[in-house]
Each structure stands twice: as C-alpha cells, then as structure tokens.
Image (cartoon, rainbow, N blue to C red):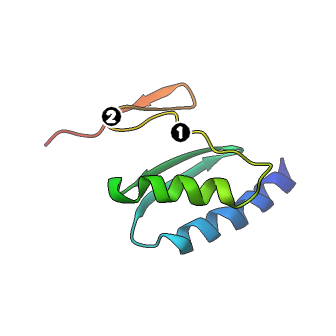
Amino acid sequence: VVLSNIYLTAFDRWLLASFPRSIHRLQRFVDDAFLINKKTAHDSIVRTLNSWNPSIVWEVTGRGNEVSFLDLSSYPLKN
C-alpha cells in the first residue's frame, strides 16, 4: 500500500498540474479517487487519466447529480 500511495501521489500531482483550472477537488483512498471537475473538461480529463499508464484504467462511476464513492452517495447542495 505504501508504494502504491507514493506512485499515485505523483500521478495526482501530475493530473492537478495538467488541469489547474478544471479540477476543483481530488481526493484519494488507496486506489479509489473522488474528483470534482468542470463539465466542459470531463472527457479530456478521463482521456488524460487513461493515457498516463496503459496498465491503469480509470472508470467513471458517477456523473451529474449523484456520485458513489466508497459505498457512499454524494449529492450537490441545493441553494
């Protein structure tokens, strides 16, 4: 787990540097990531995620108003 955290921390930094104005929030728990980004950059971010290392494939499991992460469902706050 320690080596994977070191490896993926480098990946997180690379991703945030690649999209400094498009990624609002990136949280990680081991090999799961929670990402909040601008809708207009979504497809580009997913392509970038999957281009970094061919042995790592990122899967989008939530989009829009409901996102599941680690068996929790998240919804945006309504004003």
Give the x, y percent position of residue 43.
46, 53
Considering depth in this image, is 69 or 54 the residue closer to the camera?
A: 54
Q: Residues within 10 Å of mark 2 (few under 14, many from 20)?
A: few
Considering depth in this image, is 73 or 41 the residue closer to the camera?
A: 41
First in residue order: circle 1 vs circle 2: 1
Q: Dot 1 lies on which element?
A: loop
Give the x, y percent position of residue 35.
49, 50
| Above or below: residue 2 compared with residue 63 | below
Pointer 2 residue: 75
Cα distance in 3D space between marks 1 and 2: 16 Å
Callout 2 amino acid:
Tyr
Relative placement, left or right, of 77 versus 15 is left
Callout 1 touching callout 2 (CB < 8 Å): no
Q: Residue at x 31, y 35 (%)?
A: 65
Q: Residue at x 53, y 39 (%)?
A: 60
Furthest residue in direction left, as rendered: 79
Pointer 1 residue: 60
Q: How many marks?
A: 2
Relative placement, left or right, of 62 versus 12 is left
Considering depth in this image, is 71 or 65 the residue closer to the camera?
A: 65
Callout 1 amino acid:
Val
Q: Dot 2 lies on which element?
A: loop
| Above or below: residue 13 compared with residue 3 | below
Image quarter of the C terminus: top left
Give the x, y percent position of residue 34.
52, 46
Q: Residues within 10 Å of mark 1 (few under 14, many from 20)?
A: few
Residue 49 falls in image quadrant: bottom right
Q: Residue at x 54, y 25 (%)?
A: 71
* Disc assigned to residue 43: none
| Above or below: residue 71 compared with residue 13 | above
Furthest residue in direction top, as rendered: 71
